[in-house]
Image (spheres, rainbow, N blue to C red):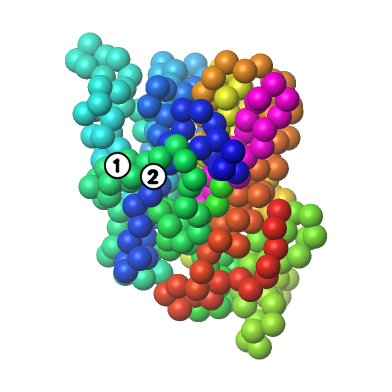
Amino acid sequence: MYNSITDVPGIKVGHYTDREGMTGCTVVLCEQGAVAGVDVSGSAPGTRETDVLRPGNLVEKVHAILLSGGSAFGLQAAGGVMKYLEERGIGHQTAAGKVPIVPAAIIYDLVVGDPKARPDADHGYQACLAATDGEVPEGCVGAGTGAAVGKILGIDKATKSGLGTASQKLTDDVIVAALAVENAVGDVIHPKTREIIAGPHRSDGDGFWSTSELLKGAQFKGAGLLPNTTVAVVATNAQLDKAQANKLAQMAVAGIARTVDPYLTMFDGDVIFTLSLGEKKCDITLLGLVAAEVMSTAIVRAITKSETMAGISASKVATSC
């Protein structure tokens, strides 16, 4: 066990990281196909191929999930993932051949680094070539390269964030895992201590302002908030149908709500994908409970594994979850 989404058999993860442009993309490969679901709770989402995941629609399985920086421009990186899969004969069978199904979601990172640096199809392809079923690099890598949180006072007061992952093993070897890219407008709260571990830095460098309290202030008029989001993938080796996969995504949202404050603002485009690979039997309520827990842990790790970059300070709070 790597405490990673790759603990779920059949999952590989690869990153493309541009540390100069401060952007990147991350692919979660499930080349044998996975029943998938999605929850798009955010009010400012950037997504691709989410409708096919709804119960009642034709396509049953997906072959990868792409998470990317670059705002809506970054969705084009999914084309490179499709190329990688097509070359290997992987995809949804049609009369004209196999079509890889690659849902995707993006974060807005254009204010960090070079706004013209955006993941493209070649970068998505490179992420696939780098994919492994072993330990997953965390922090300022892949889609988390340009991520930050607590941006209400401007990007210079924000806290550097990134990408994190976590897993849990239940009885009968059922595994539930999450991978999250944390780029919220609000603060990251430790789910157990309720301490702010990342947010707008105080001028004296001692801790963080509360974004919620700043929003309540008379001086705040709503201007200056940038598009933001938390994008994530939950995977399990439990057997789910499409309706259950969508329900699991909905239940995993609780993990973000415990860890991000404020949550679901008009400036956040939160998206959670779920993947079911395997035939293990497990109650959906238990799966949802654990999905929320590993989601919270992955978000905390996205903070604690990040480093100061592009003039954005990392959190100094030493914590674990």
Which region shows up in magenta?
166-181
Q: Residue at x 41, y 16 (%)?
A: 58
Where residue 262 appears, x then y in whole percent? 67, 59
Label 1 sits on what residue type?
A: Leu
The one of 7 and 78 positioned closer to us in this rendering: 7
Task: Determine whether, in the image, residue 313 is placed left or right of residue 82.
Answer: right
Label 2 sits on what residue type?
A: Gly
Where residue 171 appears, x then y in whole percent? 73, 25
Please give the label number shown on residue 220. Answer: none
* Residue at the disc numbered 2: 14
Where is 281 relative to 54, above or below? above
- Whether residues under marks 1 and 2 lie with C-beta atoms below 8 angstroms apart, the answer is yes
Q: Secondary structure at mark 2?
A: strand
Residue 185 appearing in the image: no
Residue furthest out toward the right: 193
The one of 215 and 54 positioned closer to us in this rendering: 54
Whole-number angstrom distance, CA of label 1 to CA of label 2:
7 Å
Task: Determine whether, in the image, residue 116 is placed left or right of residue 10.
Answer: left
Residue 129 appearing in the image: yes
Q: Quadrant of the N terminus?
A: top right
Where is 272 relative to 238, above or below? below
Q: Earlier in the sequence, mark 1 or mark 2?
A: 2
Quarter of the view holding residue 301: bottom right
Q: How many labels were placed on the picture?
A: 2
Q: Secondary structure at mark 1?
A: helix
* Residue at the disc numbered 1: 129
Q: Residue at x 62, y 18 (%)?
A: 280
Q: Residue at x 43, y 63 (%)?
A: 146
> Is residue 174 one of those drawn in magenta?
yes
